Image: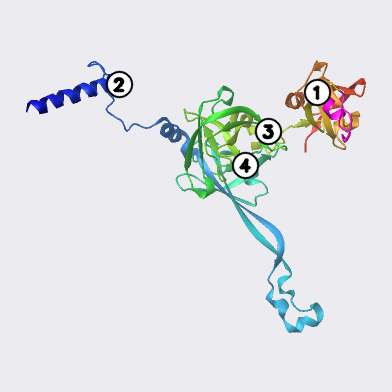
Amino acid sequence: MAIVSSLKKLISTLALSLIVSWGLFVSPSMALPTDISADSFVAQAVEKTGDAVVRIDTEKVVSGGFGFAPFMDDPMLSPFFGNGLSGRMPQERKVAGQGSGFIVDSSGIILTNAHVVSDADKVTITLKDGRKFSGEVTGTDQITDLAVLKVDSQGELLPAAVLGDSGAVKVGDWAIAVGNPVGLDNTVTLGIISTLHRSSSEVGISDKRIDFLQTDAAINPGNSGGPLLNAQGEVIGINTAIRADAMGIGFAIPINKAKEIQNTLAMGGEVPHPYVGIQMVNVTPDLARENNENPNSAFMIPEVEGILVVQVLSNTPASEAGIRRGDVVVKVNNSPIGDAAELQNLVEKTGVDKNIRFSVVRGDRTLDLNLKTAQLR
């Protein structure tokens, strides 16, 4: 009995030592939690917004190939049309697509990606509770990859998501992706915001004009158009893109960008996207010098800091203003500039059919050229 008693004391002493060394000591006045099954913040966030997430099924009719027409094998027709025509009749077929979206207004207004519903002849919206509605595409904007849909809820108020502020998002914040990837409805994945303001050119989508939120929350085909939530269950982004050559990296359109154009798309209007019509890259004196010393270079580059014009598109404001390939833009509206993304933003803020002045270095000359922005189509 003495040995057993000594062992009990030794075990108690060791246990207390471990508790203290691990920082787990609790004074008698401190109560340990009794409910360890309480919802996590993820569950609470999804509960707040999950009912507003919808599945979007699309159909479009495309023409392609030739179908089977058995009557063309009739021997009576052979003298006129020849044999083997049964596989040469043009045929139409239906192509199905799928994506996600979320309700932003209880009257039935839905946000999603433009590429989810582009050219769709039929759109079906399925709510989390299984109800189905026919959807109408009221507006799309390919440049930002955003679209607005409308369903007729026949006066019934539908669950709507709470929109957050993507401008307040910080690197390291929680990110919760909700959607219907690869047909698996109501899927939730968790990660963090890994980068802000990732340009579309960096993502590899050069025909878009978006500074993405980058996240490591899993985004898969079918997630497109679904919401990216913060820890409070507010929508901070719209899931839109994955990179096939990268593991665990996805991108979302900041919700503030969607807020800017949502009403325009809901009314079927055109979103203004001013442009000047050049392809450009940043250049430094060292890069220019390296190019100029290469005997195989396509053209000489002024050895200055600025934005190199790689190509001028025909019938654009830039071509009409006389900008040439090889020019280096060093100022815009008399203010120095050296970053292509900054120039893109300046043009965007200028508006459509507005005057803007470029100062360019061409050879050993500096020229001031006036442009008038146009609508990108």
From the viewer's perspective, tell me whether residue 94 is left or right of residue 368. left
Q: Residues within 10 Å of mark 1 (few under 14, many from 20)?
A: few
How far is mark 2 from mark 4, CA to CA?
44 Å
| Three-letter code for the amino acid on which mark 1 is drawn | Asp
State the residue in front, 42 or 329.
Answer: 329
Q: What mark, if any, has residue 24 been given in the picture?
A: 2
Q: What element carries label 1?
A: helix
Q: Where is residue 233 in the image (x, y as percent from the top left)?
A: 48, 30
Q: Is mark 2 on a helix, strand or loop?
A: loop
| Three-letter code for the amino acid on which mark 2 is drawn | Leu
Q: Can residue 158 be seen in this view?
A: no
Q: Which of marks 4 and 3 is nearer the N terminus?
A: 3
Q: Name the residue under label 3.
A: 202
| Three-letter code for the amino acid on which mark 3 is drawn | Glu
Query: Which residue is drawn at the image coordinates 68% and 33% (left, top)?
Result: 202
Q: Do the numbered discs 4 and 1 sit on residues whose CB atoms are within 8 Å?
A: no
The rendered magenta stretch, by its main secondary structure, is classed as loop
How far is mark 4 from mark 1, CA to CA?
31 Å
Q: Mark 4 points at which residue?
A: 245
